Image (cartoon, helix red, strand yellow):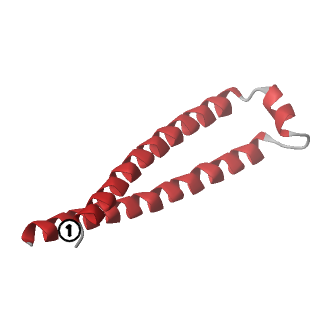
Amino acid sequence: MNQSFGKRVHGAAMAGWKTLLVGVIFLSITWFAFVCVNLIQPSWLLYLYGPGLTWSYIDVVALWLVGIFKVCLWLAALVVLWLTLWARQLQKDEAAQ
């Protein structure tokens, strides 16, 4: 197989791992901010979200958003893992030839 293709797959895998790391850091910051806001429960935030919202509704929406983001990160991790294993296999095949 073409050696440059293996390098491109390896580069894509490395870029995926870095992107995944940024996503995990962003998720951690988001979760920390959610917990802090949930403990404080400032009244101005309810005004900012709009009339008729309660803290229980905001909690449910925030938990859904964090949960969906976690699932997306999990799927991205599976793709990046597959790319990493594929790049490793391409390198082994190139070395065998």
Packing grade of label 1 (10 A; few <14, some 14-19, many >=20) is few
Query: Is residue 90 found left or right of 83 in the rendered image?
Result: left
Query: Is residue 52 found left or right of 88 in the rendered image?
Result: right
Q: How many marks?
A: 1
Instruction: Give how far across and how far down residue 14 sits, in percent.
Output: 33, 50
Instruction: Give how far across and how far down residue 64 sits, in percent.
Output: 64, 54
Task: Indicate whether 3 appears above or below 29.
Answer: below
Farthest left residue? Answer: 96
The quarter in which the C terminus is drawn is bottom left
Instruction: Give how far across and how far down residue 3 sits, in percent.
Output: 22, 64
Q: Given the image, on which type of amino acid does mark 1 rest?
A: Gln
Residue 83 placement: quadrant: bottom left
Image point (90%, 43%), residue name: 52
Image point (41%, 43%), residue name: 21
Image point (76%, 47%), residue name: 57
The quarter in which the N terminus is drawn is bottom left
Instruction: Give how far across and how far down residue 48 sits, in percent.
Output: 83, 33
Image point (59%, 56%), residue name: 68
Query: Is residue 90 found left or right of 76 in the rendered image?
Result: left
Task: Indicate whether 11 appears above or below 51.
Answer: below
Identify which residue, 27 or 79, lies in the foreground: 79
Task: Indicate whether 57 appears above or below 38.
Answer: below
Label 1's element? helix
Q: Which residue is mark 1?
A: 89
